[in-house]
């Protein structure tokens, strides 16, 4: 039976995040994580059965932190558009100042066994659904008030998440688009179609 110590689990995740941020997923060894967390290697395995499960724990931890940001901003007395702008900005601050997050949020960068991919989908998709719903809760009042077009709020939320991913790609890859986060958000909020005069 696994021990239940949230503090120790969090310490292992924080150590794993630091190691992966510095070395990358492939170069990070469980020994390195244990050393940085100040625990025995066997203790890591009491909490995580293997390295892919540590990866799942990291992604889930990051998504929970991102959800906390959405919830905190949604509680502020702001217009829906301003809330979305603040979510986008705060997420960007967290991601772009910690390069290790960029590889963690994209499974295609990590070559893991097929069973680990299946575990990823089982463990992370429910959290992604929570994220879509949390962003949709910000969007719905904007639709109701006429600030946003009448669309499915969940589909718009998914578009918002994809826009953020686009800003990550623009920031990470050398394609001449670094630092264009505001423009990516504006493109999402305004759409591509030019407004015609009536």
Image (tube, rainbow, N blue to C red):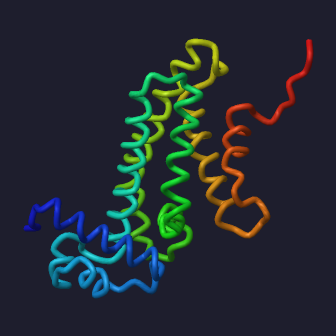
Q: Tell me the quadrant of the picture where the N terminus can be found.
A: bottom left
Residue 104, position as x, y percentages in the image: 47, 66
State the residue at coordinates (64%, 18%).
Answer: 147
Residue 112, position as x, y percentages in the image: 45, 75
State the residue at coordinates (10%, 61%).
Answer: 4
Residue 172 lies left or right of residue 106; in this view the side is: right
- The answer to which image quadrant residue 124 occupies is bottom left
Residue 50 lies left or right of residue 38; in this view the side is: right
Residue 144, position as x, y percentages in the image: 56, 13
**Residue situated in front as seen by the camera: 48 or 20:** 20
- The answer to which image quadrant residue 131 occupies is top left
**Residue situated in front as seen by the camera: 168 or 52:** 168
Residue found farthest to the right? 197
Q: Is residue 27 above or below residue 194?
A: below
How many discs appear? 0
Residue 114, position as x, y percentages in the image: 44, 72
Q: Is residue 173 above or below residue 186?
A: below
Residue 173 lies left or right of residue 125; in this view the side is: right
State the residue at coordinates (38%, 46%).
Answer: 126
State the residue at coordinates (56%, 60%).
Answer: 96
Q: Is residue 7 above or below residue 54?
A: above
Residue 84 lies left or right of residue 70; in this view the side is: right
Q: Tell me the quadrant of the picture where the C terminus can be found.
A: top right
């Amino acid at each position: 039976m696994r021990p239940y110590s949230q503090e120790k689990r969090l310490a292992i995740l924080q150590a794993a995040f630091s190691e992966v941020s510095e070395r990358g997923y492939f170069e990070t060894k469980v020994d390195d994580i244990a050393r940085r967390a100040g625990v025995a290697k066997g203790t890591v395995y009491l909490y995580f059965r293997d390295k892919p499960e540590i990866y799942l724990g990291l992604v889930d931890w990051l998504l929970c932190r991102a959800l906390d940001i959405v919830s905190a901003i949604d509680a502020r007395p702001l217009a829906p558009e301003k809330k979305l702008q603040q979510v986008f900005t705060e997420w960007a601050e967290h991601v772009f100042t910690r390069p290790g997050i960029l590889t963690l949020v994209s499974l295609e960068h990590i070559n893991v066994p097929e069973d680990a991919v299946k575990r990823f989908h089982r463990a992370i998709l429910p959290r992604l659904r929570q994220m879509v719903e949390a962003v949709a809760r910000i969007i719905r009042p904007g639709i109701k008030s006429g600030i946003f077009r009448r669309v499915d709020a969940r589909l718009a939320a998914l578009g918002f998440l994809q826009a953020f991913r686009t800003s990550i790609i623009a920031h990470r890859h050398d394609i001449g688009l670094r630092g264009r986060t505001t423009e990516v958000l504006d493109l999402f909020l305004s759409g591509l179609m030019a407004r015609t005069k009536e």
